[in-house]
Image (cartoon, grey):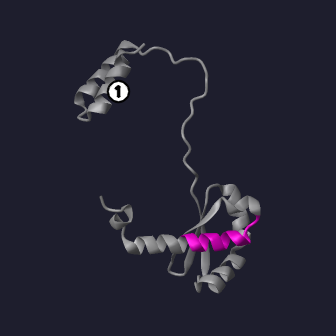
Amino acid sequence: MRAPRTYLDPTMLDQARRLEAMTQSVRTLLPPGLRDHCWVGNIKDGVLVLVTDSGTWAHPLRYMQREVLKQMKAHHGISARSIKIRVRPVMQAFTPRPGKPLPPLNEDAREALSRAADSVEDPELRETLRRFATQG
């Protein structure tokens, strides 16, 4: 069996390493609360893209743009002209809240689920739809 890294493009690995090094460098400038919520997403056409997981953190990042640009030039030789801040919320697993159970399906809904199951090629999805159609 081949090592996982042999399947990856070396150029992409180098880019990922550079972005990680820049992220660590930027984080040294940031206040402790903000450090874990910011990373370097890209640098292209003189624009450094910083990514954060909440709009709450985007605001203080805007005030630190000048310092971040200086840090990138001093430590990485990157002469970015500007910074773009992107907010990318972290996807969290759905955890249902305890509450009242859902009402049982009416006959029309059961029939619709059965028809949908008959038209689906994926066996796992087909079985799940059939199970829903026969429950409560």
**Residue 81 occupies quadrant:** bottom right
The image position of residue 4, as x and y in percent, is: 37, 61
Q: Main secondary structure of the magenta part?
A: helix
Tell me if I can see residue 96 in this picture: yes
* Left or right: 14 as drawn, with respect to 128: right
Which stretch appears magenta?
20-31
Pick the front one: 107 or 9: 9
Pick the front one: 115 or 42: 42
Residue 27 in magenta stretch: yes
Residue 116 in magenta stretch: no
Tell me if I can see residue 79 in this picture: no
Q: Which residue is mark 1?
A: 128
**Residue type, numbered disc 1:** Thr
**Residue 82 occupies quadrant:** bottom right
* Residue beneath the point at 36% across and 13% down: 107
The image position of residue 86, as x and y in percent, is: 58, 63
Q: Is residue 97 above or below residue 81?
A: above
The image position of residue 25, as x and y in percent, is: 65, 74
The image position of residue 129, as x and y in percent, is: 33, 26
* Left or right: 70 as drawn, with respect to 105: right
Q: Secondary structure at mark 1?
A: helix
* Residue beneath the point at 64% across and 83% down: 75
Q: Is residue 54 above or below residue 109?
A: below
Q: Is residue 109 above or below residue 16?
A: above
Packing grade of label 1 (10 A; few <14, some 14-19, many >=20) is few
* Residue beneath the point at 62% across and 56% down: 53
